[in-house]
Amino acid sequence: MFEDYFVVDIETCPNNLENYNELDEENKLKLLNPIDSKIVAIGIRRNNENKILMGEEKEILKEFWEEWGKIKRENANCVTVGFNINHFDLPFIVSRSFIHNVEIVPFVLKLIIDLREKINAYRYGKTRGKLSDYGKLLNLKVLDMDGSMVSKLCEENNMEKLKEYLINDLEITDEMFKRVRDTNIIHINRW
């Protein structure tokens, strides 16, 4: 069942970048929501191939749902994998789709695998670790940046560096999924 899957990751930045980088971390985090921020890139990884969607947000969302629909038409049981996908990526994508009046492809949460939830046996708290932490633990290539630096890349219009960062996160997530699958952690279920 877990042989056919695709990995999803998004990158976001505030709608208004003016003075954003001077804010303290607490105020930056307050803006990290689908009302005050937007999606600047979505990455999809399937069968070791990456598809990076960038450009105008509404078009990114349309392309994303088209790709999601295409994958699901090929195999309705294909699972979607991400790191913190249930608490960040998917709610953000759905909310921004609502804002832009973009039709989504309905999905079932039981076919979404949130690696952060699985690895922590559904425990929630601040000690759960970041994607880069797990990448380092698995001896994977981890870039010297994190999601908090995406706004700076957007401000500088450095979309190539953003793309490189997103691809690296997709690869880490893919390798984490393989480890979770191979160690049977994938079979930990909440109910």
Image (tube, helix red, strand yellow):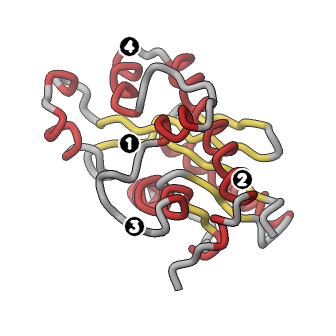
Amino acid type, label 2 = Phe
User: For the residues marked 3 and 2, what is the alpha-carbon distance in whole angstroms?
Assistant: 24 Å
For residue 143, which numbered disc appears in the image? none
N-terminal of the pair, mark 2 or mark 4, is 2
Q: Depth-wise, is mark 3 or mark 2 nearer the camera?
A: 3
Amino acid marked by disc 1: Lys
Packing grade of label 2 (10 A; few <14, some 14-19, many >=20) is many
Instruction: Name the N-terminal-most of marks 3 and 1.
Output: 1
Q: Residue at x 61, y 30 (%)?
A: 168
Q: Which residue is mark 2?
A: 6
Q: Position of residue 100 (x, y in %)?
A: 44, 54
The residues tagged by marks 3 and 1 sit, at their Cα atoms, a distance apart of 28 Å
Q: Residue at x 39, y 53 (%)?
A: 128
Q: Among all residues in the image, which is located at the extreme right? A: 74
Q: Which residue is mark 3?
A: 123
Q: Secondary structure at mark 3?
A: loop
Judge the density around disc 4: few (<14), some (14-19), many (≥20) Cα neighbours within 10 Å. Answer: few
Pair 1/2: label in front: 2
Compared to residue 34, the image places residue 11 above or below, namely above
* Residue drawn at (25%, 27%) of the image: 17
Camera-side mark, 3 or 4: 3
Amino acid type at circle 4 is: Glu
Side of 181 where 53 appears, left or right: left
Please name the residue shown 61% across and 66% down the image.
Answer: 112
Q: For the residues marked 1 and 2, what is the alpha-carbon distance in whole angstroms? A: 23 Å
Q: Of the residues tagged 2 and 4, which is closer to the observer?
A: 2
Quickly name the residue at label 4: 156
Label disc, if present, on residue 38 of the rendered structure: 1
> Is residue 138 visible to the viewer in this orientation of the structure?
yes
Helix, strand or loop for disc 1: strand
Indicate the quadrant where residue 77 lies: bottom right
Is the residue under label 4 in contact with that under label 3 (CB below 8 Å)? no
